[in-house]
Image (spheres, helix red, strand yellow):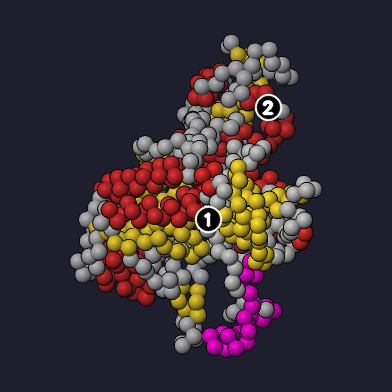
Amino acid sequence: MSFTQRTHTCGEIRVSHVDSEVTLNGWVNNLRDHGGLVFVDVRDRYGLTQVVLDPEKFPEAENLRSESCISITGKVVEREGGKNPNLATGDVELIVSSYELLNQSAVLPFPVSDEDRMQKVNEELRVKHRYLDLRRPTMLKKLQMRSAATKLIRDYLDAEGFVDVETPIITKSTPEGARDYLVPYRIEPGKFYALPQSPQQYKQLLMVAGIEKYYQIARCFRDEAQRADRQPEFTQLDLEMSFVTQEDILTLMEGLTIQVVNGLISEFDLDKEPLTTFERMTYDESMERFGNDKPDLRFGLELFDVSSAVANSDFGVFKGAIGAGGKVRGVLYPGGSKLSRKDIRELEDLPKDCGGKGLATIMVLAEGQEAEGAVEFEDLRLKSGILKFLKPDEITAILDGAEAKPGDLICLAADSYDVTCSVLSAVRLFIGNKLELRDPRQLSFVYVLDFPLVNWNEDEQRWDPSHHPFTSPKAADVHLLDTDPGAIRADCYDLVCNGVEWASGSIRIHDPVLQSRIFDLIGVTKQQQEERFGHILEAFSFGAPPHGGIAPGIDRLVMLLTDDENIREVIAFPKVGQGYDPLMDAPSTIDETQWSEMGLKQAPNSESQPE
C-alpha cells in the first residue's frame, strides 16, 4: 500500500521544529477527548509526540483505537500551556492537517500504554501476545540493551584479536549435565542429532585447529527444569583461548565485564554503581562464609561455626549432628528478636525446603523488651527453648560466634556440612531480603575458584563432574585420581554477580590420556568413550595446545542490569512453564506423514510422544 512516510521520528520533534510541517508514522499510544479537541499521543520506538486533531475537521477521529497504526502530517507548534518536562518532546505538539489510518487495532488483550496496570497482567497472556508486549518502552529498552551489550562484547574481543566462529546447531548427543533436545535423522530412522547444550567440544576443537582466540554469541539448548534464571534455549558469550593460564582468562573476563557493564550504565543511564575490580575467593571459602558457591556480597551476615564449642553439648540435636560428622553453624538476624511468632515460624520453616530438619533460634532481647520465659545470662537476657540444654561456656561461644547484640536473633542449624550450607544460605538470603540489605544499585562481582573436580553421587554410587568432564584437574592434585578423587581441585572458575552465576569456565584437558582417565573416573566405559567422544580424544592426539575458556550468559547480564527477577523478561520470545510457547502454541503435535518420514510412531496412550 502507499502511505505518507515519516519525515521525523516521534521522539525527534523539538522547539527548533516549530512552524515546520512534519509527518509521523507510529501507533496511537492513547487518546484524550477534551470536547473541542482530540489529543493523541503517537508513539514509535524512538519516543512519543502529542498531536492535536480538530473533531470538526476529522469527525472520524473519535473512532481511533489505542495501538492503531497511523501516519499523521501537521504543523509543529509550541505548547501554550501544559508543557511536559518529563517528555523529550514535551515543549511542542503537532496540529494535524491530515492523517491516514494504516491499520486499525482490534480490542487489546491488555493495556499496552499503562505500565502500572501491565504489572498485574498474567505473564502467559503477555507472552501469547508478545508482539504487543514488546511495544512497551520498558520492554523495548531491554532489547536495545541486549543489542548494545553484544556490540560492546564484540568490540572488546575484536580489539583483543579474537575470531568470531559459528559452530553447528545440530550435532552429536553427548552427556553434558542436562538432557539433550533431539532431532530425528530422517534418512536413517533411529539416529538423531542433538541441539548443543553449549559449543564446548567445538570450541576445544577450534583450539586444536590453531584458532587460538575464538568467540561467538552462541545459542544453547538444555532440556532441564526451568527456574527464574533458566530457559530451554538461551544465549551466551562463548570464548576459548590457547596457550593461556587461568589468570589470563580471569584478567580478560574482568576487563571485558567492566567495559561492557560500565558502557551500558552510561549509555542507558542506569541507576547502578560503575564497576572497578572484582573480588576473588575459593569454593571452600564461599561455602564456609556464605553457604553457597554463588555468594551475594552486597551484604555481610557471614555464617559462623560453633561445632567445636558444642561438641560435647547435652543438647541431643547438636551432639548427634557432630557425632555423625556434621556441623553446628549459624547466622545472625540483626534486630530479629522483635520478630512476631508468625515471622519466626516462617524462618523456622525454611530448612524444610533445603533438606534440613529444623532451625534453632536464640533471642537476645533488646533493652526493655519483655518475653515470657526469658533468662538472665551475664549482662544479657535471652530466650530460647534450647538454653536449658546448654552450658554457660557453650552459650558464650554461640554469642561470640554470632557477634550478637541486644535485639538480635541467632539462627542455628545442626546437620551435615552440606545441609547446614543449604539451610543457612537460604536463611541468610531471607534475612537480606527482609532487611532490604541487597542494594539494587550495587553490582558485586566475585570470582569463585578451585571447585572440586568431582562430586560423589550417592544415589548412583559414582563420581560426577562438578562442571563438565573436560575440566582440567589442578596439576598439583592429579596424583589423587586413584586414591582420593573428592579432594581434587579443578582448574575452573565461576563469575558471580549478586548471587547469580553469570559466567562459568575452566582450563580444559588437552592430553588424551588424562582425558580418558577422567572418563574412567566418572564411569564412562572405554566403549562409551570411543562412541561418544572418540572424535575429541583423537583430536587431542594431534598436538592439542593447552587451552581454556569461559561462557557468560547474555540473558542473565541484562536481567541483572534491569533488576528483573525472571530471565523471561529480557528475552524477546521466551518460553513459560515446562518450556511452553503460548505465542506459537509449541510444542505441538505433528501429522502422520511426518511420523512416517522420521521412521517413528506414537507411544501407546499418547497423542504426541514418540517411542
Measured as percent of width and height from the top left, residue 232 is found at 53, 63
Work out whether 24 lies above or below 389: below
Residue at 59%, 32% in the rendered image: 436
Measured as percent of width and height from the top left, residue 524 is found at 39, 67
The quarter of the picture where the C terminus appears is bottom right
Residue 470, by quadrant, is bottom left
What residue would you read off at disc 1?
A: 8
**Mark 1 packing: few (<14 Cα in 10 Å), some, or many (20+)?**
few
Q: Earlier in the sequence, mark 1 or mark 2?
A: 1
Query: Hey, what amino acid is under mark 1?
Result: His
- Relative depth, front residue between 605 and 519: 605
**Mark 2 packing: few (<14 Cα in 10 Å), some, or many (20+)?**
some
- Relative depth, front residue between 57 and 284: 57
Query: Hey, what amino acid is under mark 2?
Result: Leu
Left or right, 418 with reference to 95:
left
Measured as percent of width and height from the top left, residue 390 is found at 59, 23
Residue at 44%, 38% in the rendered image: 444
Left or right, 238 with reference to 352:
left
**Extreme residue in the front direction:** 19
Kindly tell me whether residue 124 is visible in this rendering: no
